[in-house]
Structures are given as structure tokens and as C-alpha cells.
Amino acid sequence: PRARAMFGKFIPVAIGMGTLQLNAFMDNLIATFALWYSPTLLGYAYPLDTGSNSILAAANRLYQFPLGVFGIAVATAAFPLLSRDAGNPAAFLHTLRRALRLSLFIGLPASVGLALVSRDVTAVMYSGGRTAFSAGGIARAGAVVVGFAPGIWAYSLTHVFTRAFYSLGDTRTPMKLAMCMVALNFVLNITLIWPLREAGLAWSTSISAMLQCVILAWLCRSLLRRSGGEAPLVDAETRGSVVRTIFSTAAMAGAVIGLLRLFPAPATWTAHATALGVAAGAGIVAFVGAAVVLRAPELKWLLHRGSA
């Protein structure tokens, strides 16, 4: 009986947590239409070409790196703590708030920073070697990275909310919402590729992720009430954390934008690498400096093992 119960929960969990993979699979199918089938659709020129799939795959790796290393890692670490506190509403809410704050503290600057250095990081990664992208390919890939970037913070928070539902035994609500988001992503895909080409696929993924995050947050409030919790999901301390993270991210963005304007338009791999290194370094210093000035506790949570 326990094995059957576990298997019954496994399928909804696999679907609910596979939204990103399902959307990526759908994006790849749409991007390879011109390569596999035809450069036209219903008599009209298809907006994507035979290089679209390569461009999409390259950009996908760049945004999934910070998402996997940081965003999903926080949710994975928080999951056993949430499960441990499932019978204690106050402790559960405390853990959930800290996980959300830490995910946003990492995810928001990662989203903004990746968007700001999208052209340089794409050039550094894909403008050399035998399979180097052309200048046009670099520009197209950079536009896709910009579209994917907002999905980092959204998916980071979504994974935390999803773990909260799982910890309280609700595996079907995230699954149902995930399937709705996959359908929405498909509709946005076939709509946005016409004006934005491959970048439309990226923006579809990010828009779906942000909407999923907002809906999960709203549903999580009701879940907490049903579980016996009376305190709000977002308290004054959490709101203050969000404000500090936004201001720290703004300081980082200002430093990166200001420094990038000092560089002439990069024309070589070395120039792109220099601009990327300087901008990334300045962004890190500015964000950490602002977090220190604003006394953001999330910075200490990251630096001191076991303090959270």
C-alpha cells in the first residue's frame, strides 16, 4: 500500500516539476519545423529557419546554468526542512519565507545581470571554434538569452512554492497548473515567433513561468490557511527583504550599464571577454556592497553554512 501511494504521488510530481522540460521540448519542436518539414507554413514563410534550433539550444544552456546551480538548488535544500515542519504551521511558514527570500535574492540579480551581458556572454561562449556563430547568429542568440532571463527568478520561486505543496501532501495542484502553463506556452510560442523569431520562444517560456509563480503564490496562501496557519505568507519582514533585493539589483544594474557604456562596441572575442569580465565583476561588487549597506540577512545565509 505504501508503494502504491508513493507511485500515485510520483506521477503528479513528475509532471508538476517537469514544466520547464516540457516547455523546452515544445520550443525545440517549433524551432526545428523549418529543418524537418518545410520553410513555409500555410503558404507563408515560416519565421524560423534551419539555424533557429541551434540558436535556441545555445541560449537555453546559458540561462539554465544559474537556474540549476542556484535557483533549483535552494528549493531542493529547503524541501526536507519544509517536510520536517509540515505539522507545525508556524515553523513551516518561517522556513518557506526564508526559502523564498533567498531564492529571490539570488534569482533576481541573476535574471537582470544575464540580460545586461547577454550579447557579450553569447559572443564569448559561441563566437570561437569550428562551430562559431556568425555575427548575426550572436545577435539572435543574445536576444533569446534576454527573453529567457526573466524566467530565472520566476522558476526559482516556483520550485520553492511547488515543494511547499508537496510537503503538505498536495501533489495535484502544481500538476494541474503546470499543464495549464504548458498549454499557455504553446499558444504564446505560435503567436510570438512571428514578430520575435526565436526570442518569441524564450519570452513565451518566461511569461509562462512568471504567471505560474504568481498563481502558485496565491494558491499557497489558501493552502497555508487550510493547514492551520493564520499568519500571512508575506509579512513585513519579507516585504522589506524584497525591497532590499530590488534596490541591490538596481545598484548592480546601474554599475553594469555604466561600465558597458565606457567600452566601445566589441568587435573581437577578447574585447567581448574583457567587457564581460569587467561588467560581471563590477555587478557582483555593486550588488554585494548594496546588500551590505542595506543589511540584507540573505547575504549571511549564503556565506555562513548552517545559519539558515
Image: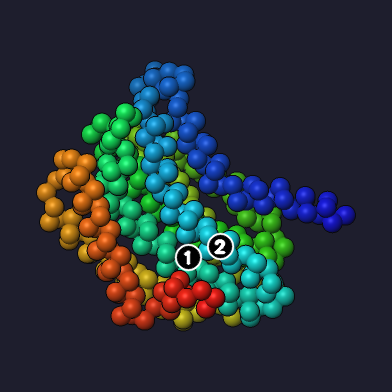
| Amino acid residing under circle 2 | Ala
Indicate the amino acid at tag 1.
Ser
In the displayed structure, 101 sits above or below 57; it is below
Q: In which quarter of the image is the N terminus?
A: bottom right
| Cα gap from disc 2 to disc 1, whole angstroms | 8 Å
Q: In this view, does 303 lie above or below 147?
A: below
Identity of the residue drawn at 43% across and 54% down:
66
Contact check, label 2 and label 1, Cβ < 8 Å: yes
Q: 89 or 99: which is nearer to us?
A: 99
Task: Name the residue: 49% across, 53% down.
Answer: 68
Q: What element carries label 1?
A: helix
Relative image position of residue 19 (x, y in whole percent): 56, 47
Q: Which of marks 2 and 1 is nearer the N terminus?
A: 2
Residue 133 higher or lower than 242, as above or below:
above
Q: Which mark is residue 276?
A: none
Residue 267: percent from left, percent from top = 16, 40
Q: In this view, does 3 lie to the left or right of 70?
A: right
Disc 2 element:
helix
Front-most of residues 217 and 27 = 27
Residue occupying image coordinates x 32% and y 57%: 113
Q: How crowded is mark 1: few (under 14 residues within 10 Å), some or many (20 or more)?
A: many
Q: Relative to 60, does residue 68 appear above or below in the rendering? A: below
Residue 245, horizontal then vertical, whole percent = 37, 71
Q: Which label sits on residue 103?
A: 1
The answer to whether one can see residue 158 in this image is no
The residue beneath circle 2 is 75
Q: Using the image as rendered, state which of residue 218 and residue 57 is in the foreground.
A: 57
